Structure formats: C-alpha cells, structure tokens
Image (cartoon, rainbow, N blue to C red):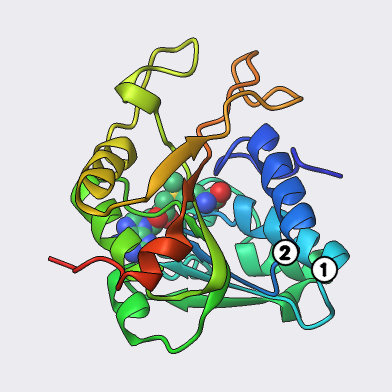
Amino acid sequence: MPFADIDGGICPGERRALYQLVASLKPARVLEIGTHIGASTLAIARSLATHSGPGAHLTTVDIVDVNDPTHGAFARLGLASPRENLMRAGLSDRVTFIAKPSSEYLRETDDRFDLIFLDGDHAAPAVYREFAQALNCLTPNGAILLHDFYPDGRPLYPNGSIEPGPVVAAERITAECRGIGFLPLGELPWESKQGVRTTSLAFATNCVGAVRRGGMQVH
Ligand SMILES: C[S@@+](CC[C@H](N)C(=O)[O-])C[C@H]1O[C@@H](n2cnc3c(N)ncnc32)[C@H](O)[C@@H]1O
C-alpha cells in the first residue's frame, strides 16, 4: 500500500496503522474530525473500500474547507486536494467532506458511527468537549480513537516534542466519567516516524458502558 504518497498529515506509519485498524474492525460508518490534507482520510477510505461492506462510508469534518485552494493546506504545501487524491484512488463515493467546526457537526448530526477518529483541535478543552459529544454519536459497539496522545505528557519521539491537549483531556474524562479509560497503542510492528515504532494513537475504552450510563455532560 502506498502509505507515503502524501507529505504532511499523520505520518506514513500511522496511516498504515489506521488502515490495519479499519481492516480489522470493519466499521460500516466512520467519522474523522480533522481532515487537513486528507492523509488519514485516504488511508481510512482505502481500508473501508477493501475490508468493509460495499456501503461503508467515511465522513470527514474540518473547520476549514480543505478542498478550497484558498483555505485548504494542500495548496500551500503544493499537494493535490484531499478530494482529488480520493478521486485518483477511485474512492470519491466513500467519503463526505464537511466544512464546519466539529462541535457544530457533532451537535447537529443524527448519524451514528462505528469508529470516530479525533484529530482536530488538540487543545484540552476542545478534545474534552469533542469526546463528550462523540460518545453520543457512537453506534452501540462504537469506538473512539485519538491521535497525538502522549501518555503522562511525556515525549514519544526523539525530537522531544509533545502535544499535551489530548492526554490532559483524557485525564479529566477518566476522573469524571466512571469506567472510561484510554489505551495507547504503543509500538507498531513498523516504523512510525523519526526512526521509532511508537504511535500516538490511543483507543478510548469502555465507551459503550459510559453511553449506557448516560454519557458525559457537555460543559
Ligand atoms: C493535525 S490536522 C489533521 C491531520 C489529518 N488527520 C491528516 O492526516 O492529514 C488538524 C486539523 O483539524 C482542523 N481543526 C482544528 N480545529 C477544528 C475544529 N474545531 N473542528 C474541526 N476541525 C478542526 C484543522 O483545520 C486541521 O486541518
């Protein structure tokens, strides 16, 4: 699989990980928050087309119109637009693009998803709010996957950088919502980036139980 064919967005090793996760979970409906240049979008759509049923679909939401040459990051980076990349891969009909803030989309939608991938605004209050709203948009066995999850706020990569928001949000969620936990995926069987195998992908656990108990109040 050509996982290195778009520069930017999530790294090639994590695109491959997303592809494999979707291949094994076989979700029919996936929601992605944070389209950006569509690197993760393409990996998820490819896997849905190959491994899920014929009607399997991805909805991807970004606060900017990612396919607009003025606003989309692709043009600044000299890339093809996310829509163009999907078209070239024969996957246009697998993906719906939504240009609006995630909070608005999650509040308004009646759709329910088997897998929700959070890779939008990484500030802790935004992730906390998105997570609470996402719980209400899951199918009964649905799962939430986070990107840029740095356990204990420690660096995962040789360059020492961290993105603190998602793990800070997760600590608040586990403190407030009984039963929910977070499972960092740890090491991939292949390189993620900077010469290491570590991934910042993490699943939320026991979302189903939390939804059964009424989910979380969105403050
Ligand atoms: C880290 S990038 C996502 C990378 C993408 N998954 C990829 O692999 O190409 C984060 C994206 O989230 C979007 N974003 C930021 N705040 C948002 C919000 N409140 N609602 C929806 N999208 C948001 C940004 O515009 C940006 O495109």
Q: Would you place residue 65 above or below residue 107 in this image?
A: above
* Disc 1/disc 2 C-alpha distance (Å): 6 Å
Residue at (79%, 55%) from the top-left corner? 23
Q: Would you place residue 202 above or below residue 70 in this image?
A: above
Quarter that holds the N terminus: top right
Quarter that holds the C terminus: bottom left
Instruction: Name the residue that disc number 1 marks.
Output: 49
For the residue with label 2, is its CB less than 8 Å from the closest atom of ligand 1?
Answer: no
Q: Are marks 1 and 2 in contact (CB under 8 Å)?
A: yes
Instruction: Name the residue that disc number 2 marks.
Output: 45
Q: Amino acid at mark 1?
A: Ala
Where, by quadrant of the figure, is residue 89 drawn? bottom right
* Residue closest to the eye, 88 or 15: 15
Q: Amino acid at mark 2?
A: Ala
Quadrant of the rendered image holding ligand 1: bottom left
Residue 155 is situated, as x and y percent measured from the top left of the image, at 39, 17
Q: Would you place residue 53 above or below residue 79 in this image?
A: below
Q: Residues within 10 Å of mark 1 (few under 14, many from 20)?
A: some
Q: Residues within 10 Å of mark 2 (few under 14, many from 20)?
A: many
